Image (cartoon, rainbow, N blue to C red):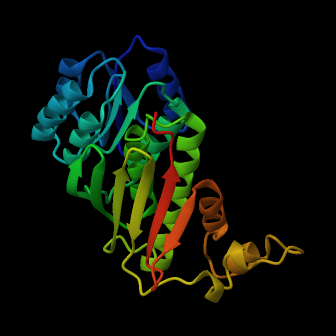
């Protein structure tokens, strides 16, 4: 497991993140600010850097550029007091590992940092195809950690939605991503999924395309959608017998939390559509 460098010392969010990482046995160090962080990076190797929640994304990206001159493979988790779509897109283009703006969820940030520190094979695996506020397209390698990274950016790009609506939509997107990565690519990190997010005046739309030959829920006997009402968890037993994660509930969840869920003829492309208040 690589070391984690956390920037900022006089902050409750940083203290909570540090406590969680320390309790998990993660090697951790602190720097008061950007200058101290660069000094520590020159002295020893850190796999993950968490920026101060008090600094702006623009400042963090400038720091990331300097850090990569010292440690090219460093994973940088950006924390910021607020964000704009342009700033989030800039972070995505710069290859930031993740992006979080206030209000923060320290356990979620610490969990992602822990997983990042445990992933010694990581490389920047989210390619921005095109990006502007209202339309963002990426290609992402098929692994669960990449899906979680994408969710942090999607969350910041949808801050204008009501909290409950945003949470439901992001959960649906996450489940569809995992379904695409599993059934379309068998979680092969050399394969990619294509994800496009489009924001109109009245809708939020996600388009997900996987590299597989297609997916038909009625043809798969190991997902929740095929369970009878008398045995709603039967698929879990079948999937455990095959060494697979519990699945299928994601399709049910997605169908229940977005307004429209539309599959292509082959089944390897899906649209998630959420109608939003235009006011």
Asked where in the image residue 60 lies, by quadrant, the reply is top left
Q: Residue furthest front?
A: 279
Q: Residue at x 52, y 23 (%)?
A: 16
For the residue pair 167 and 117, the one nearer the viewer reads as 167
The answer to whether residue 177 shows anywhere in this view is no
Residue 46 position within the rendered picture, expressed as x and y whole percent measured from the top left: 28, 38
Residue in front for this viewpoint, 242 or 94: 94
Q: Is residue 36 above or below residue 268?
A: above
Query: Is the residue 197 above or below the residue 152 in the image?
Result: below
Considering every residue shown, the one lying at the far right of the view is: 230
Tell me what residue is drawn at x 86 percent, y 74 percent.
231
Q: Is residue 234 left or right of residue 82?
A: right
From the viewer's perspective, tell me whether residue 218 is left or right of residue 144. right
Looking at the image, how many numbered discs can be counted on the residues? 0
Position in image of residue 33 (x %, y %): 26, 17
What residue appears at the point 33 percent right and 22 percent down from the top-left corner?
52
Residue 242, x across and y down, in percent? 64, 82
Residue 149 or residue 84, whichever sits in front: 84
């Amino acid at each position: 497991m690589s070391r984690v460098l956390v920037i900022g010392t006089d902050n409750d969010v940083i203290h909570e993140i540090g406590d969680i990482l320390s309790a998990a046995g993660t090697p951790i160090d602190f720097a008061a600010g950007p200058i101290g962080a660069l000094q520590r990076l020159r002295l020893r190797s850190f796999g993950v850097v968490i920026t101060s929640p008090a600094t702006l994304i623009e400042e963090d990206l400038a720091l990331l550029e300097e850090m990569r001159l010292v440690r090219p493979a460093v994973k940088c988790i950006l924390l910021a007091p607020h964000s704009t779509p342009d700033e989030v897109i800039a972070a995505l283009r710069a290859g930031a590992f993740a992006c979080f703006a206030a209000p923060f969820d320290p356990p979620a940030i610490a969990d992602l940092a822990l997983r990042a520190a445990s992933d010694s094979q990581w490389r920047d695996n989210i390619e921005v195809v095109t990006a502007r506020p209202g339309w963002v397209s990426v290609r992402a390698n098929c692994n669960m950690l990449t899906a979680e990274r994408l969710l942090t950016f999607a969350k910041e790009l949808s801050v204008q939605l009501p909290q409950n609506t945003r949470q439901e939509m992001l959960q649906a997107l996450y489940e569809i991503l995992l379904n695409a990565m599993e059934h379309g690519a068998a979680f092969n990190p050399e394969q990619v999924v294509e994800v496009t997010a489009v924001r109109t005046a009245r809708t939020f739309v996600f388009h997900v395309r996987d590299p597989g030959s297609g997916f038909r829920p009625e043809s798969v006997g190991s997902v929740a959608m095929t369970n009878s009402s008398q045995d709603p968890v039967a698929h879990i037993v079948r999937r455990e017998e095959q060494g697979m994660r519990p699945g299928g509930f994601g399709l049910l969840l997605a169908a229940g939390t977005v307004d429209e869920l539309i599959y292509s003829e082959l089944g390897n492309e899906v649209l998630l559509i959420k109608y939003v208040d235009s006011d």
